[in-house]
Image: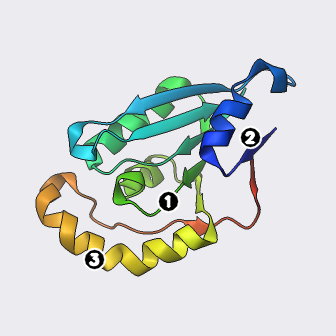
Amino acid sequence: MKLFTRALAALVFFASPAFAQDAPLEVEVLQTSAGSLYANVVLIKGEEKAVLIDPPFTMADAHRAAAMVLDSGKELETIFVTHDHPDHFFAMEVLTDAFPNAKVVAHPTVVEDIWRSLPFKVKRWSPMLGANGPKTPTAPAALMSDTIML
């Protein structure tokens, strides 16, 4: 099945039973804490593998997202970042450490925006986050197509 990079459309489209070929995809949402600005982390689960959308802002919430993936019993294949706000990617190092084989991707424009703004975001947010902030914030790789296979 294909998972379109437009995350909202994917959630609506792929969660619908009308699209199911083998088994329908399942969607699990983790609302992060106030420290991560109550952003949503979405895990889309196939039969054996999963895609996580928007890693959280804080290390603590990233560990909660990692636990959600582990509890699912699915192999995390892809981490997709929808845009350059830090509450949607800042602490992805927890997930890349926990799931080193997962590809971390975003639209090429998002990757450029993250690299351009990352020094400012680190300077602004690191003092407030302290130990709950990432040690090595980085940007995802550019997605070279308009789909993610799951």
Distance Cα–Cα, label 3 vs label 1: 16 Å
Q: Earlier in the sequence, mark 3 or mark 1?
A: 1
Q: Amino acid at mark 3?
A: Phe
Q: Is residue 46 left or right of residue 86?
A: right
Mark 3 vs 1: CB contact within 8 A? no
The crowd level at tag 2 (other Cα within 10 Å; few <14, some 14-19, many 20+) is some
Mark 2 vs 1: CB contact within 8 A? no
Q: Secondary structure at mark 1?
A: loop
Distance Cα–Cα, label 3 vs label 2: 34 Å
In this rendering, is residue 16 above or below 1? above
Task: State which mark lies toward you, 2 or 1.
Answer: 1
For residue 83, which numbered disc appears in the image?
Answer: 1
Find disc 3 in the rendering and name its residue: 120
Distance Cα–Cα, label 2 vs label 1: 21 Å
Q: Quadrant of the N terminus?
A: top right
Task: State which mark lies toward you, 3 or 2.
Answer: 3
Residue 77 can be seen, yes or no: no
Find disc 2 in the rendering and name its residue: 150
Q: Earlier in the sequence, mark 3 or mark 2?
A: 3
In this rendering, is residue 123 above or below 63? below
- Residue 145, image x, y percentages: 77, 63
